[in-house]
């Protein structure tokens, strides 16, 4: 219930994916007892409550939040997979492989391979047994890290081990497989879409279960690590995920558009994993014609490890308008809630962060934060405002009573921060404003080289570390 309430506050669609089975779980010994017992207890809990879980997900499906039924199969042989279905009749069944699970559930379903880049045989993907008709979507990033390539940001540092070159997305593409890229949160503590843990983007005709499902089947998906970077990508008019017949005599026209949420670092177009075009963020400067802007307000810090600190903020605009507000809310970061873990209670992420008001002239929000896990692992929350106006547009920013009025021009020159107490305090940061020419690019290029079974994909990197990985268009 809490997970669905959190999802409603900031997502378009979600699946709450319980851990269900591990067919080749290690034998129970003195050394493995903790792992075996912990997982078996979790599997039994889902088994006992499956009807209740499925009913709540079905009841929650609406125009406000589209839901899918799902659960997870661990596997040393095949790698961990989620089974996902648009049917509220998805049964909880137990099988030895993703293919058997999909076949025997007797409802429309697909599987998604989860945290693929772990060591082969150690619950990473098994490319030798991969079946793209069963698993059309591959998880690129999640709380576990990014499995795109050996040099991708966000390496694996979970206790399950490091990232392995043999199990990356790039390796699967080198082998000639066709699949879509997705992100997952893998939050483990009831906060779907917790900022910075990965999300899935879908190009669908409308916000309905059936439309999103059809887009997933067609691989019209991409992954984001944090910010909701908008990406369009097509080759010869065919969108991401398409599989086209090779035509060696015809040039290939690549079209793309990126609308970021922060200053872009670079946008790279790849052919067969080799870059053929780069938009360099260092060369993107504000233009006198810019009238769209992005403003990020970030809240958190402090020493409140367990108690939630409440933030109330609002922004009022004069001589301009607010076009949209993107919530970037985080839950408590808990990998394995349990009765022996003080953060492991059922309400660990019953956190009522939400947008309170969004209009052309005013936006307000409420969110909560706890202490950052470490200087390199933030638990801050943010809102991102998209604005229309001019350098003279005035913004009055109020966060927990700290009020300041500045122009867009002043905020383009730099942001500011403020603390709630004199020392080791909760704090907020108003980031510098960036203009549309700094966070957006688009273009068209032509590949005249003769090819065969080629594939083209796009990767987007922002200056704040957020990334997007866009599913290829395949030939052959």
Image (spheres, helix red, strand yellow):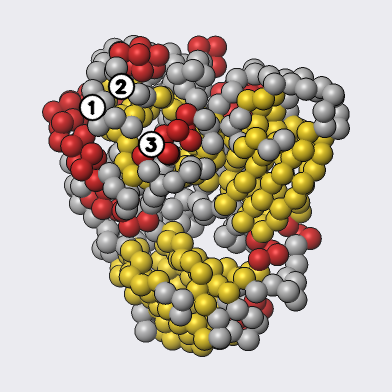
Does residue 26 appear to the left or right of 315 in the view shown?
left
Q: Position of residue 277 (x, y in %)?
A: 79, 43
- Which residue is the site of mark 3? 210
Q: Does residue 38 appear anywhere in the picture?
A: no
Does residue 358 appear to the left or right of 320 in the view shown?
left
Could you give the CA–CA distance between mark 2 and mark 1, rounded to whole angstroms? Answer: 7 Å
Q: Which of the 4 image quadrants contains residue 189? A: top left
- Asked if marks 3 and 1 touch (Cβ < 8 Å), the reply is no
Crowding around mark 3 (Cα neighbors within 10 Å: few <14, some 14 to 19, many 20+) is some
- Which residue is the site of mark 1? 89
Residue 302's place in the image compared with 34, above or below, is below
- Which residue is the site of mark 2? 107
Q: Secondary structure at mark 2?
A: loop
Residue at image position (32%, 53%) is: 64
Q: Position of residue 126 (x, y in %)?
A: 50, 16
Does residue 470 appear to the left or right of 372 in the view shown?
right
Residue at image position (62%, 46%) is: 232
In the image shown, does 395 or 404 lie closer to the viewer?
Answer: 395
Could you give the CA–CA distance between mark 3 and mark 1, rounded to whole angstroms? Answer: 15 Å
Could you give the CA–CA distance between mark 2 and mark 3, rounded to whole angstroms? Answer: 14 Å
Which badge, 3 or 1, comes first in the chain's sequence?
A: 1
- Asked if marks 2 and 1 touch (Cβ < 8 Å), the reply is yes
Crowding around mark 1 (Cα neighbors within 10 Å: few <14, some 14 to 19, many 20+) is some
Residue at image position (45%, 33%) is: 214
Q: From the image, state whether disc 3 or disc 1 is nearer to you.
A: 3
Q: Secondary structure at mark 1?
A: loop
In the image shown, does 113 or 426 lie closer to the viewer?
Answer: 113
Q: Position of residue 297 (x, y in %)?
A: 48, 70
Q: Secondary structure at mark 3?
A: helix
Q: From the image, state whether disc 2 or disc 3 is nearer to you.
A: 3
Q: Does residue 239 appear anywhere in the picture?
A: yes
- Asked if marks 2 and 3 touch (Cβ < 8 Å), the reply is no
């Amino acid at each position: 219930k809490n997970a669905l309430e959190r999802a409603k506050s900031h997502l378009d669609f979600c699946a709450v994916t319980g851990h269900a089975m591990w067919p080749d779980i290690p034998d129970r010994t003195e050394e493995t007892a903790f792992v075996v017992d912990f997982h078996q207890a979790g599997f039994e809990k889902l088994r006992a409550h499956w009807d209740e879980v499925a009913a709540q997900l079905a009841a929650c499906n609406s125009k406000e939040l589209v839901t899918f039924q799902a659960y997870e199969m661990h596997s040393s042989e095949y790698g961990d997979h989620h089974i996902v279905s648009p049917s509220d009749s998805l049964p909880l069944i137990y099988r030895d492989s993703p293919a058997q699970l999909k076949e025997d559930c007797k409802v429309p379903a697909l599987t998604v391979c989860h945290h693929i880049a772990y060591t082969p045989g150690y619950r990473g993907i098994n490319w030798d047994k991969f079946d793209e008709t069963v698993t059309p979507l591959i998880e690129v990033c999640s709380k576990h890290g990014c499995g795109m390539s050996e040099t991708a940001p966000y390496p694996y540092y979970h206790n399950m081990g490091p990232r392995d070159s043999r199990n990356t997305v790039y390796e699967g593409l080198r082998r000639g497989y066709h699949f879509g890229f997705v992100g997952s949160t893998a939050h483990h503590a009831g906060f779907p879409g917790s900022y910075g843990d990965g999300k899935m983007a879908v190009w669908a005709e409308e916000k309905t279960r059936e439309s999103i499902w059809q887009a997933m089947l067609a691989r019209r998906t991409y992954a984001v690590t944090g910010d909701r970077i908008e990406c369009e990508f097509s080759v010869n008019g065919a969108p991401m995920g398409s599989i086209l017949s090779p035509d060696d005599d015809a040039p290939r026209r690549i079209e793309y558009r990126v609308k970021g949420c922060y200053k872009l670092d670079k946008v790279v177009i790849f052919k067969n994993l080799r870059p053929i075009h780069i938009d360099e963020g260092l060369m993107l400067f504000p233009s006198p014609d810019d009238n769209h802007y992005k403003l990020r307000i970030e809240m958190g810090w402090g020493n409140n490890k367990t108690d939630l600190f409440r933030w109330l903020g609002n922004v009022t605009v004069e001589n301009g308008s607010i076009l949209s507000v993107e919530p970037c809310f985080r839950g408590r970061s808990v990998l394995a809630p349990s009765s022996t873990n003080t953060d492991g209670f059922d309400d660990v992420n019953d956190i009522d962060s939400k947008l309170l008001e969004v209009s052309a002239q005013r936006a307000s929000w409420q969110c909560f934060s706890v202490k950052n896990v470490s200087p390199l692992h933030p638990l801050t929350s943010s809102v991102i405002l998209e604005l229309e106006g001019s350098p003279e547009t005035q913004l009055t920013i109020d966060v927990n009573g700290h009020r300041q009025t500045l122009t867009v021009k002043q905020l383009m020159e730099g942001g500011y921060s403020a603390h709630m107490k004199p020392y080791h305090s909760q704090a907020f940061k108003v980031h510098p404003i960036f203009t549309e020419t700094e966070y957006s690019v688009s273009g068209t290029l032509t590949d005249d080289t003769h090819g065969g079974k080629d594939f083209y994909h796009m990767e987007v990197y922002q200056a704040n570390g957020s990334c997007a990985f866009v599913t290829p268009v395949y030939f052959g």
